[in-house]
Every structure is written in C-alpha cells, then in structure tokens.
Image (cartoon, helix red, strand yellow):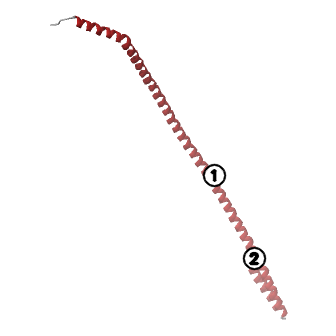
Amino acid sequence: MFNIDFTFLWTLFNLLLLFFILKKVLFGRIGAYMEKRAQKIADEYQRAGRERAEAKALLDSYNEKVQEAAAEGDALIKQARKAADAESARIIAGAKSEAARIIEDARRQIQNEQQAASVAFKAHTATLALAIAGRILRHKLNADDDRLLAERMLREIGDMGGR
C-alpha cells in the first residue's frame, strides 16, 4: 500500500528544507511586515477615533458659539429697537411741542393782527366821524341839534368800540 522510496524521502527533505528556509527568510519578513501593517492600521483607527472626537468637540463648540452669537444678535436687535423707539418717542414729543409752540405763536399773531385791525378800524371810524362832524359844522345848527348829534355820535362810536 504505502511504499516509501528514496525519491519520496528526497522530495520530503527538499520540501522541509525549502519550508524552513522560506520560514526563516521570507515568512519572518512577511510576518514582521504584516505585524507592522496591522499595528499601523490599529494606530490609524485610534488616530481616526481621536480626530473624530476632536471634530465632534469642535462641532459642538461651533454650534454653541453660533447659538451664543444668535442670542447676542437678538439682544442687540432688541436693544437697537428699544433705542429706536425711545428716539422716535423723543422726536415725536419734540415735534408735538414744536407744533404746539407754532400754533400758540399763530394764535398770538392772529390776536395781534385782530387788535391792530380793531385799532385801525377805530381810527378810520374816528376819521370818518370827524369828517362827518366837519360837514355838519359847516351847516349852522342850533345848540339842541348840536347836543343831540354829539350824543348820537358818541353812542355809535361806543357801540363800535365794544365789538
């Protein structure tokens, strides 16, 4: 059945010799290379994990800063609106005050003009009265007519002055 001859032994010896030589020369280097490669891959995974954690921390920090900036921006906008409202109220109050002053000045000016017109009217009336009196005096009247005419004129002038 199983017959061992010299060729078989010689082949087996060559095979074992080749295996030991390859193991010593080639497999050792390949094993060392594979070990270094495996360590390098493991180091890369660790480094990638650290970088991922750092990136997540940076992202969280960035998101926090964005939220803080948004809150600060909202606060600035509210403050600016409040200042604008205050300034608007101040301007409106000033405008109302100025309008009231202008209206009061206009009323005073109207009163002054009415008084001036009244004085001018009275002066004109007096001038007319004197002109009428001058015409009447040209006509000779008796003392009773003069007295009645003078009383009537004084009464009419007094009525005009009261208006």
Q: Residue furthest left?
A: 1
Query: Residue at 78% of width from left, 82% of height from top?
Result: 124
State which quadrant residue 131 falls in: bottom right
User: Which residue position holds label 1?
Assistant: 87
Query: What SS does tag 2 mark?
Result: helix
Position of 27 with respect to 95 (left or right) is left
State whether residue 142 appears in this view.
no
Q: Residue furthest front?
A: 7
Please give the label number shown on residue 12: none
The quadrant of the image that shows the C terminus is bottom right
State whether residue 76 appears in this view.
yes
User: Which residue position holds label 2?
Assistant: 118
Query: Residue at 72% of width from left, 67% of height from top?
Result: 108
The foreground one among 42 and 142 is 42
The quadrant of the image that shows the N terminus is top left
Q: Is residue 30 above or below residue 73?
A: above
Packing grade of label 2 (10 A; few <14, some 14-19, many >=20) is some
Packing grade of label 1 (10 A; few <14, some 14-19, many >=20) is few
Position of 16 with respect to 44 (left or right) is left
Instruction: Name the amino acid type tagged 2.
Output: Ser
Cα gap from disc 2 to disc 1, whole angstroms: 46 Å
The foreground one among 24 and 55 is 24
The foreground one among 130 and 53 is 53
- The image position of residue 125, as x and y in percent, is 77, 82
- The image position of residue 94, as x and y in percent, is 66, 57
- The image position of residue 101, as x and y in percent, is 69, 62
State which quadrant residue 13 falls in: top left
